[in-house]
Image (cartoon, helix red, strand yellow):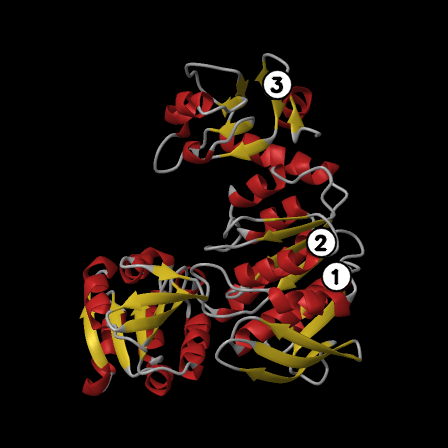
Amino acid sequence: MNPLWTAGELRAATGGTLDGDVLVGGVAIDSRAVGPGDLFVALRDARDGHDFVPSALAQGAAAAMVDRDVAGGPLLRVADTLAGLAALGAAGRARSTARIVAVTGSVGKTTTKDMLRHGLAHFGETHAAVASYNNHWGLPLTLARMPRGTAFGVLEIGMNHRGEIAPLARLARPHVALITQVGAAHIGHLGSLEDIAAEKADILEGLSAGGTAVLPRDSEFFPMLAQRARAAGAAVIGFGEDAAAEARLLSADCGPLSSTAEVTLNGTRLALSIGAPGRHLVVNALAGLAAAAALGVDPAGFARALASFRPGAGRGARVTLQVPGGEALLLDESYNGQPPAMRAALAVLGTQPGARRIAVLGDMRELGDFGPALHEGLLPDVSRSADLVFCCGPLMRGLYDALPATLRGAHTHTSEALAPLVRAAVRAGDVVLVKGSLGTRMAAVVGALKFEGAHP
């Protein structure tokens, strides 16, 4: 088997020094996840990765990338490990012949990325970002890990502040750039939807020559996004319900377990089916279908491949819980939460049959001065979909206080305090949605619900 990186390639890519003739089979930044033959990159974050070089080498790492003296070896010595990782990612992209799609958007980017990975894998070796590795270290790491024989690469690009997407897009150099949606995520940092749209449009700055932009046709910002795309020399595919969309949603039937839809792509009618409920997932699948077609994949075959797609943990995974007297159903949306995604998840909860529909909601972060109004604005959606509501976090207090008394379960400041209250309340036949921003740690509630036993 060909190595991922040879010693000579590591030196050439990073400009670093490395003694010996090592062969690297993978790249890791977490010493706990190091496998035999990996390159361990000692990044600095909450902890300094250099402190973990000895343990990474003891676990079988072939070498460690460092920028200061540490014990052990072999060592790939560079001026700065984060810059070294970025350089290695750039080299991984430069040598690759894969067809690359990069996904950004206020919501839905990880799920759309996962749909693309799932569908494209039916057509060739496909490499994609792990989890939500979409930032200044996650994207270079994904590129550095891309195998030589990759046919399709699926990258995710995120942001928290203005100016973060463009350099990542230029590193990725995708053949297809997909923007899922422009919404209020991170509006506290960017200040307005217009600024968010402009930041998302910066993904177009990295498009390869002759590339394609897949854009949300129903968005009020579509004209600006399309203008930016055409200025970059890109072809434009709009997706959505708008009659002018090249990838158009004609109808959708979203049941409690799955969703089906009739769509057209450049005038050709296709059937879509996914193993998960939710109109928002149908739209994500439509965007993925348009992007796959732009990569040269047979649209009908890609659509058939999506029939076996299932959301991952924290993003809509369905888990059967063992509770006193029988079973309950968990809808695990604990990984993230922003206003459009929160409404979509509540709509899915509303379609589920059960004794009671319970919503467990954590704060939506990074909304700035818009936060209180956006939380209280969920009241109609919650009232339509839930029979009982638990909330945690200071921002969710406003929503909780606005609820009718008959819907109130409990409010706490933290998810750790809320978790045992939810666990005690769940009964056989209930359906429980858990959702909130990652920083609200709603996974603590999921863990408490699973504690007495669960199976997919």
Give the distance between the C-alpha atoms of the residues marked 1 and 3, in whole angstroms: 39 Å
For marks 1 and 3, the one nearer the N-term is: 3
Say which amino acid is labelled 3.
Val
Q: How many residues crowd mark 2 within 10 Å: few (<14), some (14–19), many (20+)?
A: many
Q: Quadrant of residue 443?
A: bottom left
Q: Provide residue 199's location: percent of width, then percent of height.
A: 55, 60
| Amino acid bearing label 1 | Thr
Q: Is residue 78 visible?
A: no
- What residue did someone put label 3 on? 22
Q: Nearer the viewer's eye, disc 2 or disc 3?
A: 3
Q: Position of residue 188 (x, y in %)?
A: 39, 63
Q: Which comes before the other along the chain, label 2 or label 1?
A: 2
Which residue lies at the image location 71% right of the left edge and 47% below the top edge?
A: 125
Helix, strand or loop under label 1: strand
Dot 3 crowding, Cα within 10 Å, few <14, some 14–19, many 20+: some
The type of residue carrying mark 2 is: Leu
Specify which label sits upstream in the sequence, 2 or 3: 3
Q: Which mark is residue 207?
A: 2
Q: Which mark is residue 420?
A: none
